[in-house]
Image (tube, grey):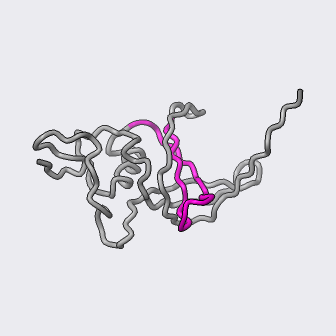
Amino acid sequence: MSIVIPQAHYEAVESGEYIAEIVGIDSTNTQFGQQLKFYFALSNGGNVDRKTICGWCHPSFTTKTKLYRWTKAALGGAEINTSYNFNSDDLVGRKVIINVEKRVNDNGGFSNKITDVKPYNPTGSPGPIVEQPSPQAPSQNTLNWAGTSEE
């Protein structure tokens, strides 16, 4: 019996800033240990055949980590309440701006690296683009992720 595996083709995008939607986050074991793999679908004005670029970060959630910075960007750029715990479901479906670098890889081909993730704001004004929902069910008179009071 024959085994057929289709050849995969990867086409790197040019270096620059792109509007992207977080379409998935997986936990995976890599040569660098456990990592979170973010899937960013580049915006092309529609949803047909959007190019997806992956980015990795260590699963540590402190104010000094890449995961924290990416989470903050996805939640609109506002400060994250200290009681907030990372939850990937809070980020999937959100838009961000990603800085992408096109690099030559070891075999002479090209690959992409995400060098920064920033809040997406279509109006151009600072701050979150919309009133963000609290990622955790609010109890009476509690603070949401942005630190604003909910009653």
* Residue 28 in the image: above or below residue 12: above
Q: Which residues are magenta?
A: 35-60
Outermost right residue: 1
Q: Is residue 45 left or right of residue 79?
A: right
Quadrant where the N terminus sits is top right
Could you say which is closer to the camera, residue 69 or residue 42? Answer: 42
Question: So how many labels did they put on this image?
Answer: 0
* Residue 7 in the image: above or below residue 132: above
Residue 55 included in the magenta stretch of the image: yes
Residue at horizontal 35%, vertical 73%? 124
* Residue 137 in the image: above or below residue 14: above
Q: Position of residue 76 (x, y in %)?
A: 33, 57
Outermost bottom residue: 124
Residue 48 included in the magenta stretch of the image: yes
Outermost top residue: 1
Q: Position of residue 147 (x, y in %)?
A: 19, 50
Residue at horizontal 40%, vertical 47%? 91
Could you say which is closer to the camera, residue 121 or residue 64? Answer: 121
Q: Is residue 1 left or right of residue 131?
A: right
Residue at horizontal 31%, vertical 72%? 125
* Residue 69 in the image: above or below residue 17: above
**In which image quadrant can residue 29 be found?**
top right
Could you say which is closer to the camera, residue 97 or residue 110? Answer: 97
Q: Position of residue 120 (x, y in %)?
A: 40, 63
Q: Is residue 145 left or right of residue 72?
A: left
Residue at horizontal 10%, vertical 44%? 141
